[in-house]
Image (cartoon, rainbow, N blue to C red):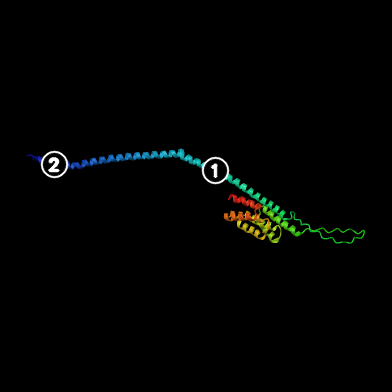
Amino acid sequence: MTRRVLPARSIAAALLAAWLVALPARAALFDDEEARKRIELTNQRLAQVQKQLEDRVAALEGQLKSQGLVEIFSQVEQLKIDVAKLRGQIEVLNHELEQAQKRQRDLYVDLDSRLRRLEGAPATGAAPAAPAAPVASVPAAPAGAPAVAPAPESPAPGVANEQRAYDAALEQFKGGSYAASIASFASFVKAYPRSPLAPSAQYWIGNAQFAQKDYRGAIASQRQLVAAYPESSKVPDALLNIATSQFEMGDGAASRRTLESLIARYPHSEAAIKARQRLAIR
């Protein structure tokens, strides 16, 4: 059998074709290897970044544990101590305020008593002695007849009743029964509008309303005193109470005007001295 011998050109062509077919496969092999290397490098970089982040987080946690949290805890504890101190100071101030209010009430009562003495009001409720009537000539009694003693003078019941009513209302105020004292003093003023004690009774109505924090009512009552009894020695104290009530209501301008008016009208009164002290610190 005769073999067919291929020409050299055909062999060369066949080899070239085979090389061309294998070339893409080899190129694909090289591309896949390169991709794996790049993926590996990326993973390494990700691992490095993750480790850096973990290190930074750990460092921050260490700082918080060693400094931040300890400092915050210390601040919280200090705040607790400060709050406890403030609570104690508030309790002391509340106690001092109660004592000051009690001293103020006692001062008012003492001042009222002194003013009543200056105004000539009876201190014990006894009626003033009536002027002696002229003695008429009386024929001498016959010998042996019993001597007739003169009838004793009886005190005026109206003055005694006024004093008892006033003192009862004042005791209610001193005991802290402000509503009852307001009603009692109001009844007194209505029953005895011309009594020397009427201005004082009207003043205590306003003062009791102030103690109840009824500042508008206190102002109205004290203004009623000023209008009804302009010559009374209670007027300066009434004006001072009006100024205090206005200040408690937040009307500082009106309070200042009232204090200035008080000083101008009654410059030598005790109320004017207090008014100057208040204006000096405002």
Residue beneath label 1, please?
82
For the residue pair 264 and 211, the one nearer the viewer reads as 264
Q: Is residue 274 visible?
A: yes
Secondary element at image label 1: helix
Residue identified by numbered label 2: 14
Q: From the viewer's perspective, is residue 207 above or below residue 13? A: below
Label 2 vs label 1: CA separation?
Answer: 99 Å
Secondary structure under tag 2 reads helix
Among the 4 quarters of the image, the one containing residue 197: bottom right
Instruction: Please report whichever mark, 2 or 1, sits nearer to the chain's N-terminal start.
Output: 2
Residue 238 position, x and y percent, is 64, 56
Would you say residue 213 is visible in this rendering? no
Identify the residue at the far left of this view: 2
Question: The residue under label 2 is which amino acid type?
Answer: Ala
* Residue found at x 58% / y 45%: 89
The image's mark for residue 104 is: none
Identify the residue at image location x=50%, y=40%. 74
| Residue 36 to residue 121: above or below | above
Q: Residue at x 68, y 52 (%)?
A: 111
For residue 51, side relative to residue 263 (left or right):
left
Amino acid carrying mark 1 in the image:
Asp
Place of residue 275 in the rendered image (x, y in percent of width and height, measured from the top left): 62, 52
How packed mark 1 is, by other alpha carbons closer than 10 Å (few <14, some 14-19, many 20 or more), is few
Which is nearer the eye, 278 or 27? 278
Q: Residue at x 64, y 48 (%)?
A: 100
Q: Is residue 147 left or right of residue 42?
A: right
Do the residues under discs 2 and 1 have CB atoms within 8 angstroms? no
State which quadrant residue 53 falls in: top left
Determine which quarter of the picture holds residue 39. Answer: top left
